[in-house]
Image: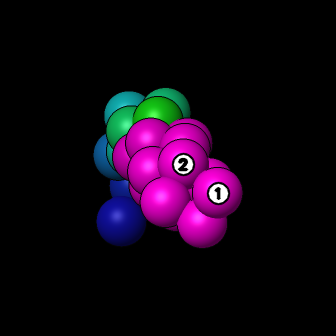
Amino acid sequence: MTGESWVRLIPWVIASGGLWAALLWSWLR
């Protein structure tokens, strides 16, 4: 894996993680 692929992947992972966190938070409430 090259550095560029990580630079493009990290924002997507963060966005996906935030989406899952919001979904779990609303579900656990």
Secondary element at image label 1: loop
Q: Residue at x 54, y 48 (%)?
A: 26
Q: Which amino acid type is marked by label 1?
A: Arg
Q: Label 1 crowding class (10 Å Cα cut-off): few <14, some 14-19, many 20+?
A: few
Main SS, magenta residues: helix
Secondary element at image label 2: helix
Q: Residue at x 60, y 66 (%)?
A: 28
Which numbered marker is on residue 26? 2
The vertical placement of 25 against 4, above or below, is: below
Residue 19 drawn at (x, y percent): 44, 42
- Is residue 2 at all visible to an observer of this figure? yes
What is the span of residues highlighted in magenta in the rendered image?
16-29
Disc 1/disc 2 C-alpha distance (Å) = 5 Å
Count of labels in the image: 2
Residue ID for mark 1: 29
Q: Residue at x 64, y 57 (%)?
A: 29
Q: Are marks 1 and 2 in contact (CB under 8 Å)?
A: yes
Residue 12 drawn at (x, y percent): 39, 39
